[in-house]
Amino acid sequence: RGAMDHQPKFFENLSGTGKAIGVLTSGGDAQGMNAAVRAVVRMGIYVKAKVYFVYEGYQGMVDGGDNIVEVSWESVSSILQVGGTVIGSARCKSFRTREGRLQAAYNLVQRGITNLCVIGGDGSLTGANLFREEWSGLLEELAQKGKIDEEAVKKYAYLNIVGMVGSIDNDFCGTDMTIGTDSALHRIIEVVDAIMTTAQSHQRTFVLEVMGRHCGYLALVSALACGADWVFIPEYPPEEGWEDSMCVKLSENRARKKRLNIIIVAEGAIDCHNKPITSEKVKDLVVQRLGFDTRVTILGHVQRGGTPSAFDRILASRMGVEAVLALLEATPDTPACVVSLSGNQAVRLPLMECVQMTQEVQKAMDEGRFVEAVRLRGRSFENNLNTYKLLSHKKPDAELPKTNFNVAVLNVGAPAAGMNAAVRAAVRVGITEGHKMFAVIDGFEGFARGKIKEISWGDVGGWTGQGGSILGTKRTLPAKYLEKIADQMRTNNINALMVIGGFEAYLGLLELSAAREKYDEFCVPMVMVPATVSNNVPGSDFSIGADTALNTITDTCDRIKQSASGTKRRVFIIETMGGYCGYLANMGALAAGADAAYIFEEQFDIRELQANVEHLTEKMKTSIQRGLVLRNENCNENYTTDFIYQLYSEEGKGVFDCRKNVLGHMQQGGAPSPFDRNFGTKISAKAMQWISKKLKETYRKGKVFANTDDSVCLLGMRRRNLVFQPVAELKNETDFVHRIPMEQWWLKLRPLMKILAKYKTSYDVSDSGQLEHVAMHSPKEAETGAI
C-alpha cells in the first residue's frame, strides 16, 4: 500500500444514494444463497441505495415486468434459515442471445439499475461479465431503436458487476469455500453417519455416490470426514490395476475385524483413460471379486437441500456485505470481481481470472494432466488429498520406518466435538512416520496416575464421527503432578507430547515448559492443537469444536424464532457458553439473525440495554414481530441473563413479552460437524509431522533433548495460514485473568451483525477493497498452506 492509505476507511463515508442495485441468483441453487441475498438487500438499503430483486435469474431480467421489483428491509426477513433461493433461479436460453441481453439491458435501464450482484456458479458469472462488456453497445442500440434517449445512454453508461459464488461443488478457483459447500457436506455426513450404523449391523459394504460432475471436492472431504476406505474423484483417477488394490484393501480391512466398508464415488469420477467409473461398476466389482454384501446409495438432490449451516450463513452474510462495498467503490475501470474468502480473509478477485483458472482445471483433466489439475484446484484441495492419502492406507509393517521414538497424545480441558478426529489423525500419521504412539486417558490427571497405553492404527478406526472425547479429558493442570508426570514420561520413555485441548492445554504447556529447568523429562518437543467450543485460545482464529457448537446454537435459535413468530411479539433471551469469550454469542447472533448479542469484549451499560429495548419496540410495529437476543454467559457479572430478562419484561410491558433460554452443555456435545472433522484431522496431521521434524533435530547422542522455546508450540490457523507459534511468545497476547486472547479477529465482524439488525454503527473496512490476483501457488506452498 502507498503512504496515502494510512487513514482507516469507514463504510459510513461510502454512500449509495442515487444508486440502484439488482440482486439475482442463477444456475443451480445452493444453501446460503438466501443469506447472501438478505445481506445485499440490507446493506444496500443501509447505505441508502435502492435494491431490486430480479426473480428467476437471468430469465427474470429478460422478461422484466413483475420479475424486477424494489424491495424493503422486511422483504428479506425470515429467509436466513431457508435453503435454496427464495427469489428463484432458472436456466435461461434467451440471455445467451444478444436479443435477450438487449431486452435485459432495457429492463434494467428503465429502473436505473447499473449495479448487479450475481450469486451463482461460473456459468452465471461468465454471462454477467459478457453483459458488462456489451453494455455500452447495447445502450447505443437501444437508443438507435428509439427505446431510450441519449440522456439515459450517458447517465447509465457503465454497468458494475460483483459476483458471489454459490455452488455446492466448491468448483470455483480463487475461493476457498463457495456458498453451499459446507451445507452440502453436512447433508452427506448426516447420511454417512446413518448408513454406518446399518452397515455395521450387517457387515455390509456401501458405495455412496455424491454430487460433483467436474469437481471431486465433496467426495474428497466427505471421505476425509468419515474415514472412507476408498474415494474416486475426477481430478485424481486411480492408477492402472486399481481394481486389484481396492479389493485387497477392502478384504484386509475385513480381516482386521472392520465390519463395514464405505466407498465414496463422485458422479464425475473417471479412470486414467478418462472412462467413467460409476457407483454401479464399483458395486459389481466388489460383489464379483469378494462376494461382499454391497449396496449403492445415490445421494442426489438431498445434497442441495435443507437449512444452510452456520458456516454458510456467516460466509454468505460476510460476502453479501462485501459485495455491496465493492459495488459502491467500483469505477468504470475496475474489472468485474468476485468476493470470496481466502483462509479467514475476505478478498476481491477479478472475475475472469477465476473463471479462466477454473476452465484450466477442466482442460488439464481432459488432457490427462491430473497432477496439474490438483495443483490448479488450490492449496486447500491439495492438502485434503495429501491428508486423505496419508490416513486411509496403512502400509505393511515391513515397509514402515522404525524411529524408536514414543509419542504420547492426550486431551485436556472440556470435551469438544472433533477431538477424536484429531487423535485419530495424530495416531495414524505418527505410526506412518515410524513412531510408537501412546494414548493418555483423562488428561494430565490420568497421566500422573499412569493411565497410558500403546494405541494402534486399527484402534482409532471410526473415530472421526464420534463426538466428545473418547480418551477422556480433564481440566486439571499439570503443575500439582509434575513429579508423577515426569516419572510416567521416564517409565514409558515418552519422547514427545501432543496435547489436544482448550485454554487449560495452553496453560498446561506453559507449566510443563517452565518445569524443564527441574525435570529433564519435559525437555522434549511438545505441541498443542486448539480444541474448545469457546474458541478462546490465543494464536488461532479457530479451534476444533467451535463450529459444531455454533451449529447447535444456530439450530436452536431457528426453532426458538419459529416459536416466537407463532406467538407474535415475543422476545427471547438466549444464554450461550464461551467463558469470557464472546465468539459463540457473536457469531451465533450473526448466523441466527439476532437483534443483539451481549459480550464481555464490548462493554455495555444500562443505556445500551435501554436502546435495545427501544429498538425492539420499534421492530414490533413492523411485520417482523419477534426478537432474539444472545448473551454470553460471562459478559457482565451484574447484568445476568435473569436481570436482562426482567428488565426487558418490565420495559416491554404491553408491547412484547419475554422468555429466556440457557443452552448449557448441549453446546459441547453432538456429532462433530464436517468442518470440525476436517479441521481436526488436517491440523493434527500437520502437528504430528512437526513433532517428527523436531525429534530428528533434537536427537543427540542417543537421546532427545529439546529445551528451547520453539520446541513447545501451538499450531493455529491465522488468517490464511497454519502457523506454529512458541507458547512463550503467545504469553504477551493473552489476557490470563479472563482466559481470552487480547486481540480477536471476529470482533471486526461485530458491526456486520448490527448492520443486518438495523443498528447505526461504525464499520472499519480498511481491510477490504484491494483487488488481488488469483495466485498460482508453488508446490512448496501446499506444505505450509491453508486448511
Image (tube, grey):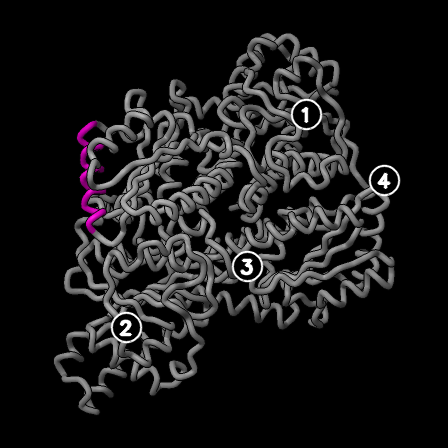
| Residue at x 44% of width, y 33% of height | 663
Residue 68 numbered tag: 2
Secondary structure at numbered mark 1: strand
Depth check, front residue: 640 or 409 = 640
Depth check, front residue: 534 or 744 = 534
Q: Earlier in the sequence, mark 2 or mark 4?
A: 2
Depth check, front residue: 41 or 158 = 41
Q: Amino acid at mark 4?
A: Ala
Secondary structure at numbered mark 3: helix
Check the image and name the residue furthest to the left.
151
Q: Residues within 10 Å of mark 2 (few under 14, many from 20)?
A: many
Q: Which residue is mark 1?
A: 408
Query: Against 598, is 394 above or below?
Result: below
- Mark 2 or 4: in front is 2
| Residue at x 58% of width, y 37% of height | 418
Can see residue 562? Answer: yes
Write the start and end of the magenta stretch as one range. 606-621
Q: Amino acid at mark 2?
A: Ile
Q: Which residue is mark 3?
A: 377
Q: Amino acid at mark 1?
A: Ala
- Mark 1 or 4: in front is 1
Work out how far the residue at label 2 is from the one at label 4, CA to CA, in angstroms: 68 Å
Given contact means CB atoms under 8 Å apart, are the residues at marks 2 and 4 in contact?
Answer: no
Where residue 36 appears, as percent x and y from the top left, is 36, 57
Q: Amino acid at mark 3?
A: Arg
